[in-house]
Each structure stands twice: as C-alpha cells, then as structure tokens.
Image (cartoon, rainbow, N blue to C red):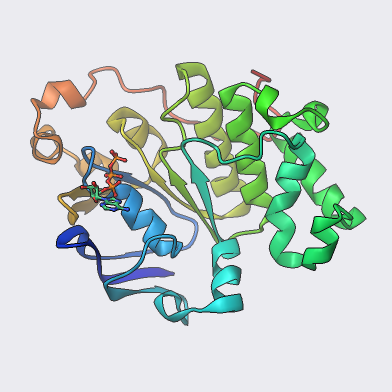
Amino acid sequence: MLVVDGLTCRFGTKAAVDNASFAIAPGSFVGVIGRSGAGKSTLLRSINRLSPVSSGRVLFNDLDVTALRGRDLRQWRARSAMIFQQFNLVGRLDVLTNVLMGRLAEIPSWRSLAQLWPAEDVAIAMSALEQFDMASLAAQRADQLSGGQQQRVAIARALVQQPDIILADEPIASLDPRNTKIVMDALLRINKHFGITVVCNLHSLDLARSYCDRLIGMATGRVVFDDVPAALTGQIARELYDLEADEVMDARPVPPAAVPAFGEAAVA
Ligand SMILES: Nc1ncnc2c1ncn2[C@@H]1O[C@H](COP(=O)(O)OP(=O)(O)OP(=O)(O)O)[C@@H](O)[C@H]1O
C-alpha cells in the first residue's frame, strides 16, 4: 500500500503540491489528471524522491519513504520506477544496454562501468524487450528509434527493475495516437500481468477514463477529486480544467482497453 499523507512540496513560497493525502492499493492503475501546472509531475517525482518533500510523508507498506537516505533511497528509486515524457534513454548506447541500466541497483558498479553484465541480467533484459516486440532491435542505438519504440525501451528498463510501482510522468505526451495506444497498452499489460501498481500522469481525460481504475484530480497542488472514472462528471471536469466540459470530455471515448497479451504490440 502506498500512502501519501499530508504531502507538501514547495518551490520558494509556491506549493506545487499542497497537503495531498491518499492511499493506493497494490495492483491499481491510477491516473493523475489536472491542468498544466496543477502539480502532477511534482507529486510523482516526490513519491520517487526526485523532488524534495517540504512536509508530510510518503509511506510504502512499513517503509517511510520520506526518511530514506543513501543506499536505502537508491533501492526505493529502483522499487518505484519512473517513466518520463522524454524517455530518458542514453541515445548513443544500444537498446539492450539501456534496458540493462534498470538492473544497476542489483549489480556492483564496476561491472556496469565495464559493461560486464551478468548473463542472468542479459536474459531478463532480453525477455523484457521480447514482451514489447523490441528484441529484434536490441543492438540498435537508442537514438535511432521512433518515439514509441524509445518509450517501450524505457518501459522495459522500468520492468527489469522489478519495481513495486511504476510512476509514469506523461508517458505519451510526445507520441502520435498509434504509439500512444501501444505505450498505454504496454503499461496496462504490466499492471494486469505482473500486478505492478501504475500511477500515470495524463493530460487526456479520455485515455485516463479508458485505462485507469481510479483517477486523482489535482488543481493548484491540491487533490480535488479521487474516485473511479465513472464518477468524473462534466461538472467536475470543468472545475478541474477551468474549461467548458465538452472541451475536455470527448463524446467518443477511446475504445475500451482490453488487456492485450504480451507480444501483441506492433513494431512501430
Ligand atoms: N523545480 C521547480 N522549481 C520551481 N517551480 C517549480 C519546479 N517544478 C515545478 N514547479 C512549479 O510547480 C507547479 C507545479 O508544476 P508541475 O510540473 O508539478 O505541474 P504539472 O501538473 O505536472 O504540469 P504539466 O502538466 O504542465 O507538466 C508549477 O507552477 C511549476 O511552475
């Protein structure tokens, strides 16, 4: 169970996250929604401890995440894998090595510096790539891939961390509709097949309603909505986005997300 308890993250006098509290049960697929600047990224980054916490706590089971330092903090960052909008791959390295980076917390640094990856880790990384139809591209430089392919490599890297939770910070913001679906389906498969909790910042309400089993709505740093997608009325959406409801609630929802089996993703 992930518990966010009175979490506040300040930048100067501005509270990017303001007294946020909620609990997320294992295996959930939670969407964090809200307009630009609402505090979604800061919330995810503070759970991973990439952004500093001003007050309040993040707890994971018995672990006080906010109090972690040094090696314990590094281990938490491996257990709470981040996926970023801009993929954050090392472009000059091949795909397999990028995925193996997800194993860094498990192996001595001299081995990774010398790129002496244990055979078992190579097998884990290749298996992750296979699950996203990316194994044939293992030797290719990461910067030669399309955006959708790069994000699948980033998801494979997150998966080999064997995380308890994946924190995806607008993972589809730079992708076209086809790759958006491929990447969201990949996150859904990880969630349903491995039971890994996914918390995903999304701009699109339609995607959030299609893929998530719960939505947390933020406005000016505060949690102002926390419920199942069906409870998100046009009125609440209008308040969240400060727009006319029909501007944010598409009348044609994205087709419901059936959970695709591994290996079904098309190579983009
Ligand atoms: N490192 C920082 N230094 C100063 N202010 C910051 C920093 N990071 C975020 N902020 C501010 O905190 C607020 C929340 O930003 P955040 O990026 O968390 O929002 P968001 O909902 O993720 O927005 P977007 O959807 O545009 O990414 C914004 O006003 C932003 O300018």
Residue at image coords 40%, 76%? 66
Q: Count the labels in the image.
A: 0
Compare residues 201 and 91 and report the one nearer the observer. Answer: 91
- Whether residue 215 is visible: no
Left or right, residue 237 beside residue 21:
left
- Res 147 quadrant in image: top right
Compare residues 12 and 53 and report the one nearer the observer. Answer: 12
Left or right, residue 248 beside residue 45:
left
* The N terminus lies in quadrant: bottom left
- Residue 255 rendering spot, x and y as whole percentages: 41, 22
Residue at image coords 74%, 66%? 106
- Residue 86 rendering spot, x and y as whole percentages: 50, 35
- Residue 57 rendering spot, x and y as whole percentages: 33, 75
- Does residue 72 sit above or below 104 in this rendering? below
- Whether residue 250 is visible: yes
- Res 155 quadrant in image: top right
Residue at image coords 22%, 43%? 37
* The C terminus lies in quadrant: top right
Compare residues 256 and 175 and report the one nearer the observer. Answer: 175
- Does residue 60 sit above or below 24 in this rendering? below
- Does residue 260 sit above or below 123 in this rendering? above
- Res 144 quadrant in image: top right
Residue at image coords 55%, 37%? 87
Left or right, residue 237 beside residue 71:
left
